[in-house]
Image (cartoon, grey):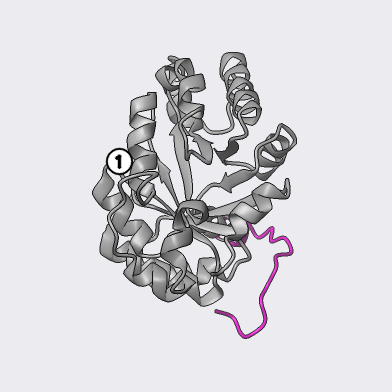
Amino acid sequence: MRENKILTTFKNGGAIINGWAQLPTSFAAEVFANSGWDSITIDMQHGPVDYQRALEMLQGIETEQTPAMARVPWNEPGIIMKMLDAGCLGIICPMINTRAQCEAFVGACRYPPMGYRSFGPLRASMIYGDDYAPNANNFCITMAMIETKEAVDNLESILTVPGLDAIYIGPADLSQSYGYPPKADPTVPQIVETVEYIVNTARKHGIYVGMHCADVAYGLEMVKKGIQFITILGDSRLLQVASMNVVKQFKSGAATASAQASGGPY
């Protein structure tokens, strides 16, 4: 059985820098996996990635054996089970607002008697070994997104669902649900206090915490607060930012030093 390095890092008290993959090609995922991320999450909720593309992206990521997860489009058992069977080491599920919703999510990720996941780990067994199935309940990460006021109001009951490993804070939806503009790296006092409440409550219950960030400095501050799974932007946004920076430097004539990999100009 191959090690789940995300869980190992969590248990050792370390922090994961997680890549966010939205470009729907195996080559883009392979390039991303060669960039040194501790893990990569395929985003199937927002953006153009469907199941077939996600499978191809997993194959690209596997070239580096980078731990891969998926954010599924919704709390729907079919796609959750298919992505686990495809080889994802964990599932991030959006809009978990109640204990019942969390129980349904966790149950879809766990084989009986812990849950109701259907048996058929075709690619997962091929990648992780014939002993995948008997170990899967302790191997695959369940990460529920906490991103609404309703979820915060029900936080204690959500965090005590058996089999829940982690939560993932969605700052844009969280801000929006409290009546503020959707924004990453929130600075509004009420949202900052809410994030701190979420983190502290989760840690009290032994639940790991992740969060989506837009800036590295902000992400590092969140690690100091106890968050162990940090995503910085996503592949499409990182590509856009890097491209815009190159064009801006060239057109302004004020180029700055930049890293260049060996092997040619491409």
Q: Residue furthest bottom?
A: 263
Side (left or right) of 113 relative to 265: left
Residue 1 drawn in magenta: no
Which image quadrant: the C terminus? bottom right
> Which residue: 39% across, 25% down?
99
**Residue denoted by label 1:** 74
Residue 97, by quadrant, is top left
**Could one spot residue 48 in this view of the protein?**
no
Relative to the observer, which residue lies in front, 145 or 255?
Answer: 145
- Point 51% across, 28% down: residue: 159
Residue at 30 percent of width and 46 percent of height: 116
Is residue 49 found left or right of 235 in the rendered image? left
Q: In which quarter of the image is the N terminus?
A: bottom right
> Could you say where residue 234 lies in the image, as x and y percent from the top left?
49, 51
Across and down, in percent, residue 257 comes to 74, 64
Decide whether the magenta segment is chiefly helix, strand or loop.
Answer: loop
Seen at 51% across and 58% down, the residue is: 40
> In the rendered image, which quarter is residue 210 located in?
top right
Q: Is residue 167 above or below residue 156?
A: below
Give the magenta part as a residue range.
Answer: 247-266
In the rendered image, residue 253, in percent from the top left (x then y), is placed at 65, 60
> Disc 1 residue type?
Trp
Q: Which of 187 and 14 is in front in this view?
A: 14
